[in-house]
Each structure stands twice: as C-alpha cells, then as structure tokens.
Amino acid sequence: MITKELIKDVTISILRRAETTLPKDVKQALARAYEREENEIAKVQLEAMLENVRLAEELQRPLCQDTGLPLFFVTLGSCNVELSDIESGIREGVEEATDLIPLRSNVVDPILRRGEGANIGDRMPYINYLIDSDVDGLEILVFPKGGGSENMSAFTMLMPKPEAEALKAIKNFVLETVLNAGGKPCPPTIIGVGVGGSADMAMKLAKVAVIRPAGVRNTEERIAQAEEEILEAVNNTGIGPMGLGGNTTALDVHIETASTHITSLPVAINFQCWAARQAVAKIHEDGRVEYV
Ligand code: SF4
C-alpha cells in the first residue's frame, strides 16, 4: 500500500542520493570529457569535478553548496493513492531532508527574499505530474536544480520557417544563449532545448530534455542529427569548463519537440550544470520500493 509516510521516506532517500551521487551517465560523460580535453586549465577543472564527485559519494555530502531547487516529476501509473498524500509526503520529505542531509535553504519568497528555511514554500516543492498506465504504482524523480544554471534559461518565439531554416534558426538561438551565458551555468552543461507547443510547454520540454541521460539521442533521426551538430558548435565556442576556456562547454545537447500553432515556433533553453543531479524511485502498488 502506498502511504504518505512511505512517500516521505522515499523522498528523503532519493534526495540524499541525488545530492551526493551523480548518475552514472553524467560521471561517464565527465570522465570522457577529461580524457578528450586538450586545454590544460580545462583538464584541471574537469579533474577537480571528478574528484568532487568521488568525495561527495564517499563522504555522502552534497556535490555542491548550491543544493538546488526541489523539482519533482511524478509518474502516476495504476495505483490507488491520494494526490494529497503525494503532495504532503513529498513536501514533508523535502523539509526533513533539508535538516538530515543537510541541504542549504534555497527556497525564498520571490519578492521578500525570505523563506521558511526548509526548502518549502508557496508551490514549492514543484511537482510535475505525468500519467503512464504501464507503470505499476508510481515513480518519483527528484531533480534538485542549481540556481546558476537555471538563471541562464532563455525563451524566444521564432518566425515559422521551412525545415532547414528553422533548424538553423534554432541552432543560432542556442549558440547566442550559450555565448551570453559564458561560465555562469557552471559548464560543462547538458543543454535542454524545447521546441514547439505553447510558450510554457516549450519551457517544460526543455526541462524534460535535460533530464534525459547524457549520450541518449532523440529517437527522430533529423532531431538527433541537430543535437549532434549543436553540441559540436557549442563545444567549438571555447567557453570550456567553468568558463575558463577549453573544448568542453557542454556534455550533451538534447532537443524535445511538440506540435505547435501554425503561426508559432517557440524555442526554450534550459541548462543543467555539471552537477547534473537526479534520482528516481519506483513505488509499487504493494509498497515495494525500487531505487533506479
Ligand atoms: S549551477 Fe550547479 S554547479 Fe553551479 S553552483 Fe549551482 S548547483 Fe553548483
């Protein structure tokens, strides 16, 4: 049975895991970048990141002083659980985890700049709901999002164009945004690009894009090719790790698309910093928990 208490305990566990242990795909991408990098300063930066990752895991300490904004994706499958139990289980889990792990109190009122001190607040933690009838129970993905990378998010409404021109315009917008951002999103980043839908949907798609594991391409061939081309162009900017120069500005570029209005071409960009934290748990209908 899935209870509020179980959801709270799982929230604490996945937050701890996300904050202290980078996903394997990101660790491998950082290690590959270190091997490939030719710029000496960039190599030192990447080496320091890899050592940071190793120590955080060994000592079970957060990877970065910025422990992020508590963002969640909850996939609801076939299960009998009250939405209010999910909301309050996650909220209480975040509150307790802030004290236990511990986490920095990042959540504040946007105008008063004051918070409750436990990473909870108005509509925070932010929970996105997805429905998937193939899932037994529910899945909770936590995604603590660093402020430096989130602050460099960008959005534009491009003029609709024929395919080749549209892809070129999207690429130019990404490059312009990356150049403006420089070292601020703590590169090497994973760059999420949301194309299509409505304005808010494009932003959501960009966020979904950064969650995709590094090295996994869009299933549509022409979009996958655009991801490769943009990644190469971003790494040719020379911004490098932490903006100090080098060949590794991004670990990957992911594009997610949705159908849009005939007069629109919305494009949103979301950066994920090198501390690309996330963790997932599946809670089965009978109460069993699997950490993925
Ligand atoms: S953007 Fe990421 S790496 Fe940079 S300070 Fe924030 S959490 Fe840390």
Image (spheres, grey):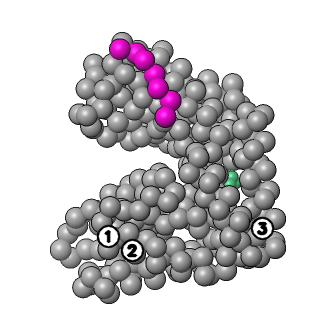
Look at the picture and state if 66 lies above or below 148: above
Q: Is residue 5 left or right of residue 67?
A: left
Q: Is mark 1 on a helix, strand or loop?
A: helix
- In the image, is the residue at mark 2 within 8 Å of ligand 1 by its beta carbon? no
Q: Tally the numbered discs.
A: 3
Q: Which quarter of the picture shows residue 102?
A: top right
What amino acid type is highlighted by mark number 2?
Gln
- Asked if labels 2 and 1 touch by Cβ distance under 8 angstroms, the answer is yes
- Asked if labels 1 and 3 touch by Cβ distance under 8 angstroms, the answer is no
Residue depicted at 74% across the width and 61% down the height: 46
Q: Name the residue under label 3.
A: 43
Q: Nearer the viewer, residue 115 or 240?
A: 240
Magenta stretch, residue numbers: 286-292
Q: How crowded is mark 3: few (under 14 residues within 10 Å), some or many (20 or more)?
A: many
Residue 225's label in the rendered image is: 2
Q: Which quarter of the picture shows residue 148?
A: bottom right
In magenta segment, residue 287 = yes
Residue 6 placement (x, y as % from top left): 47, 17
Going from N to C along the chain, the mark reached first, 3 or 1, is 3
Residue depicted at 27% across the width and 37% down the height: 132
What amino acid type is highlighted by mark number 3?
Lys
Q: Is mark 2 on a helix, strand or loop?
A: helix
Residue depicted at 74% across the width and 76% down the height: 38
Residue 221's label in the rendered image is: 1
Residue depicted at 22% across the width and 64% down the height: 259
Going from N to C along the chain, the mark reached first, 3 or 2, is 3
What whole-number distance in Å separates the C-alpha atoms at marks 1 and 2? 6 Å
What whole-number distance in Å separates the C-alpha atoms at marks 3 and 2? 28 Å
In magenta segment, residue 202 = no
Look at the picture and state if 169 lies above or below 5: below
Q: Is mark 3 on a helix, strand or loop?
A: helix
